Amino acid sequence: MINPIHLVSPALLKSPNTDKIMTMVIKTSLEHTNNFVLEFRGVTKRFPPNNLANDHITFGVKQGSIHVILGENGAGKSTLMNILYGLYQPDEGSILLQGKEVHITSPRRAIELGIGMVHQHFKLVETHTVLENIVLGLKHTPFTLPNRKLEEEIKNMSNAFRLPVDPQARIWQLSLGEQQRVEILKALYRGAKILILDEPTSVLTPREIEGLFSTLRSMKKEGKTCIFITHKLEEAVEIADTITVLRKGKVVGSFEPTKVTLRELAELVVGKSIELTAKKPRVSDFGETVLEVSDLWATGDRNILALQGVSFQVRAREIVGIAGISGNGQKELVEILSGLRYPKKGKIIVNGKEFTKIQPADLLQEGIAYIPEDRRLALVEQMNISENLVLRSFHRSPFAKGPWINWKKVKEKAVRLVKEYAINPQNIELPVGLLSGGNKQRVVLARELSRHPRLIIAAQPTVGLDIAGTAFIHQLLLENSSRGSGVLLVSSDLDEVMLLADTILVFFRGKIIGKKERPQQGWSEEDLAQVGLWMGGVKEETR
Ligand SMILES: Nc1ncnc2c1ncn2[C@@H]1O[C@H](COP(=O)(O)OP(=O)(O)OP(=O)(O)O)[C@@H](O)[C@H]1O
């Protein structure tokens, strides 16, 4: 029997509704103890050096239910599902299926145990047919059956579960919604009794989402269990029988959707931000506009609309924080502003100059510092620290001497920056590829910020860094903004955005769903809950 205390981490429940929530947690946990098809007991997973991705996860999933797992980026959802599907092994804890402990050592073992998974990025062979994909890799390949029989079987299955798809169509001919149906059929054909769906609606149109929900309801009728991972609050409440919230690797609690409001759910998901106790004075004298984006439209890598009419501005001395679950258009926005992607439509004004398409060279020209999410884009790992520090300026005075490089000047600058930005080790001849992640990031910041930029575009600047590295980068961004730079900070870490931003914009499905300006007295619990609701896709709370 599950100890209800394990279902909640009281330290994480800092909302004013703690008592009510605790009562619901305990009640829900007790109601559920009898008929779990699946139980996680103390499941723990650590990633080196010290990332506790799953911290003693304990909860149960009812037979024939739709169980939603809700949580911010990095909450530990995928890690837990990868453990359940045999892709990772837990460091501690156990998994029980129908009350019996199982060791899921590989995805093959998971499938044998009746666990299927539909990944966020489909794993289909594009040039093969639906039917071929469904049977691909099976031990006793049913290709020995007459294909007509197999086709019949698949058709019956797709009728029973409302998964219309042509078995002879090739994957590349199908929409993403249809491809997802193939993935579900593939799992069902392999005998899945428990189906894990990792953010299944992120690639679907509203109509396709309705189709998926009716499939899940038919699966439920047939006694199948679905584990549904999402960031979206309304969707969670619509489809779930039970919602388990994860935060920072821990279970916050399991809830019945009818007994919790969207606002309470949002509070549970985002928790209490560090900023509510920290103090950053509100800046009231922002300077001139350094970046203005109007009605920006763009498609993403899969040709889906990623930005839909985004408009905002960044002023000198202002930190504009773009919050939101990743995958809502932030990446495409940063790519456009750094010259890596062209928009379909829209206007970008930098320092009063209009651009429809920014080129990478414009960053230098307009004094834009760019700190990309992927540090490999900003550095040449085979080159040493000093070479990387002048990558953008070696052709200019004082580093250029006719067609030659003035290495003495380069060295002087590198020695100064390595000290100023506490890059460790301080050996400027060391190839950047040998530095730790935090020190690589310091090299990027040293190069970009030492040019005294008018605009800083920082995308997930502290991802993967330790506490000291993160604090150092926060300090640099704050110092540069108070010296006059405008900062566009894109981060899926809400704590970071709340800590630094003067203005918060929340992205959802390619649009700005909400905007908040830092009040004089700092952010309140109310602001945090509102941002949490927007991140979960709730524009106005109606429930
Ligand atoms: N293979 C890995 N190696 C190192 N760290 C990892 C690995 N996979 C996940 N992590 C870390 O574990 C933590 C939990 O990540 P996880 O992907 O499980 O979260 P999530 O809730 O699924 O997030 P998202 O919604 O962004 O997918 C994060 O801090 C992440 O950086």
Image (tube, rainbow, N blue to C red):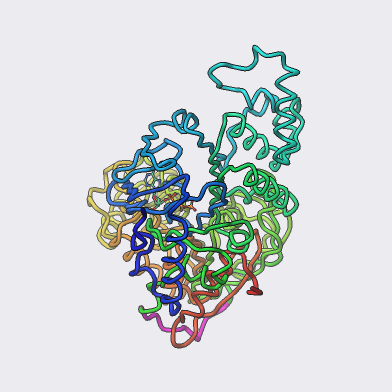
Q: Residue at x 43, y 40 (%)?
A: 97
- Residue 60 rendering spot, x and y as whole percentages: 44, 52
Q: Against 221, is 362 above or below?
A: below
- Residue 314 rendering spot, x and y as whole percentages: 56, 72
Outermost residue to the top: 144
Provide the residue span drawn in magenta: 278-288
Q: Is residue 317 left or right of residue 202?
A: left
Residue 51 visible in the current orientation? yes
Q: Residue at x 36, y 55 (%)?
A: 2
Q: Residue at x 56, y 52 (%)?
A: 361
- Residue 455 rendering spot, x and y as whole percentages: 51, 67
Residue 138: which quarter of the image? top right
Judge by depth and name the residue closer to the eye, 108 or 508. Answer: 108
Task: Tell me if residue 129 is in the magenta stretch.
Answer: no
Q: Against 221, is 158 above or below?
A: above
Residue 483 visible in the current orientation? no
Work out which quarter of the rendered image holds the C terminus and state it: bottom right
